[in-house]
Image (cartoon, rainbow, N blue to C red):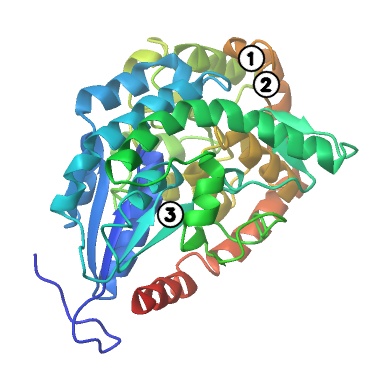
């Protein structure tokens, strides 16, 4: 692969390795950052799930795959992936696969060459295990959403449970210690086995390892979405959302263009690109559309999830770039993934968030706090029940009828778009870390 001379005048390009795990939603922000580094003339390599490696390869990045396609597909096919309490064990399988395949890392390790590795929090532990063998390497952990950084500040969202403002600080710390136990039990056995092979001491707590052993921390979200909180690492750089679409210049299909022109702006319903259990979701969405008398677009790659008989007021689409469609719709009903949330903020589109797991509960709370939408959670002790069509229709009706909400969304969009392509501080920080390696 040919690398151009960096514009900063260095004799050779700086070397960066970007390492991520998870679904495409986890990968895309890192891919955006990798391309920004490459555009500055640097040498960038990418590490991701084997099943997603083609997405990085098709934009010209030299890519290494971890895990197998079958393992990745099995993870997405497991309904527990989207369960607020059971998802941890599904994630464990992905982390275990990365630890297993880490034996291949020396084949592309920088050795004595200066290098900065930018890692997803769940990939960080594996990368950090090799720092002993890579003496001039610095490891930066990059967080996509605030919830992967820990703080006891108020307001505090503990998974699906909002912590009351009156909770004493000591109780909040106790909750984090309780949370540590299942995370450590799931994530540390394979990681510590890997560290033992390299003669490194065992890690006691997963989150403390990320905080203490990272050379620097990046927040790939802006401070107006969440400012730095008490307890976050001191060596930290705030950035902005890394919006990425694999086909950003795609034109609207003729059928979609005709549908948009045929009536009032529709509501988009999507459970997320990685969700493979959306049958009940779209059945309820159809009932909501019928109750409200609105038009809708059902967005999912899985046609079998969509009711076979749709009225003329509803259109199914397998894929549409969000940045293309969202400025033309009345509202977006979604799962609360950070990438989807960011696209709706940038487009000024009112949001209704139905969080399922991971960072989605905290993202939903922030959408409400910003005044750009609302959120509904499934029953805490029966999450599989989901959100009823009646409740969904009642909340969506309020959103669609609120002029104040639409004005607030436009204000937030203007604030967001002013910085949406500004990665300057992040790139300068990464270059400085490289020069100090």
Identify which residue is drawn at 36% across, 48% down: 28
Left or right, 345 with respect to 67, comes to right
Q: Is residue 430 visible?
A: yes
| Label 2 vs 3, first from the N-terminus | 3
Q: Is residue 310 above or below residue 93?
A: above
Question: For residue 378, what is the image quadrant?
Answer: top right
Q: To which residue does mark 3 refer?
A: 243
Q: To which residue does mark 1 refer?
A: 389
Distance from the alpha carbon under mark 1 to that under mark 2: 6 Å
Residue 359 image point, x, y percent: 57, 37
For mark 2, does the 10 Å Cα neighbourhood hold few (<14), some (14 to 19), or many (20 or more) residues? some
Quadrant of the snapshot with the C terminus: bottom left
Identify which residue is drawn at 26% across, 24% down: 71
For mark 3, does the 10 Å Cα neighbourhood hold few (<14), some (14 to 19), or many (20 or more) residues? many
Kindly identify which numbered label has been placed on residue 393: 2
Identify which residue is drawn at 55% across, 43% down: 207
Q: Residues at badges 2 and 3 in contact (C-beta under 8 Å)?
A: no
Left or right, 218 with respect to 97, comes to right
Left or right, 54 with respect to 78, comes to left
Residue 145 image point, x, y percent: 55, 47
Identify which residue is drawn at 62% across, 41% down: 363
For mark 1, does the 10 Å Cα neighbourhood hold few (<14), some (14 to 19), or many (20 or more) residues? some
Element class at badge 3: loop
Q: Residue furthest right?
A: 166
Q: Residues at badges 1 and 2 in contact (C-beta under 8 Å)?
A: yes
Quadrant of the snapshot with the N terminus: bottom left
Distance from the alpha carbon under mark 3 to that under mark 1: 31 Å
> Viewer-proximal residue, 330 or 158?
158
């Amino acid at each position: 692969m040919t690398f151009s001379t960096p514009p900063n005048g260095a004799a050779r390009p700086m070397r960066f390795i970007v390492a991520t795990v998870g679904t495409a939603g986890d990968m895309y922000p890192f891919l955006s950052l990798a391309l920004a580094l490459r555009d500055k003339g640097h040498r960038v390599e990418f590490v991701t799930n084997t099943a997603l490696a083609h997405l990085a390869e098709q934009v010209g990045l030299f890519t290494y795959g971890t895990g197998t396609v079958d393992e990745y597909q099995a993870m997405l096919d497991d309904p527990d992936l989207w369960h607020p309490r059971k998802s941890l064990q599904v994630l464990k399988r992905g982390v275990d696969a990365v630890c297993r395949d880490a034996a291949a890392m020396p084949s592309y390790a920088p050795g004595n060459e200066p290098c900065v590795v930018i890692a997803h929090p769940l990939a960080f532990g594996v990368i950090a295990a090799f720092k002993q063998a890579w003496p001039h390497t610095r490891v930066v952990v990059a967080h996509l959403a605030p919830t992967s950084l820990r703080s006891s500040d108020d307001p505090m969202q503990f998974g699906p449970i909002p912590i009351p403002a009156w909770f004493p600080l000591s109780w909040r710390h106790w909750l984090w210690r309780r949370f540590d136990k299942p995370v450590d039990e799931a994530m540390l056995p394979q990681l510590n086995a890997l560290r033992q092979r390299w003669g490194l001491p065992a890690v006691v707590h997963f989150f403390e390892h990320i905080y203490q052993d990272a050379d620097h921390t990046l927040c790939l979200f802006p401070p107006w979405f969440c400012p730095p909180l008490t307890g976050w690492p001191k060596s930290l750089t705030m950035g902005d959302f890394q919006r990425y679409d694999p086909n950003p210049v795609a034109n609207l299909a003729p059928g979609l263009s005709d549908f948009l022109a045929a009536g009032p702006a529709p509501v988009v319903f999507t459970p997320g690109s990685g969700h493979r259990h959306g049958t009940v979701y779209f059945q309820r969405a159809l009932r909501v559309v019928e109750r409200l008398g609105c038009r809708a677009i059902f967005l999912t790659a899985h046609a079998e999830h969509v009711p076979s008989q749709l009225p003329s007021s509803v259109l199914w689409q397998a894929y549409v770039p969000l940045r293309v469609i969202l400025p033309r719709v009345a509202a977006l009903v979604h799962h609360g993934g950070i990438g989807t949330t960011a696209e709706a903020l940038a487009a000024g589109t009112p949001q209704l968030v139905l969080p399922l797991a991971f960072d989605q509960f905290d993202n939903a709370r922030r959408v409400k706090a910003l005044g750009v939408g609302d959120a509904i959670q499934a029953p805490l002790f029966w999450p599989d029940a989901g959100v009823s069509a009646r409740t969904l229709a009642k909340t969506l009706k309020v959103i669609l009828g609120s002029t104040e909400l639409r004005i607030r969304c436009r204000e937030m969009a203007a604030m967001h778009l002013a910085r949406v392509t500004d990665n300057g501080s992040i790139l300068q920080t990464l270059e400085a870390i490289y020069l100090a390696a």
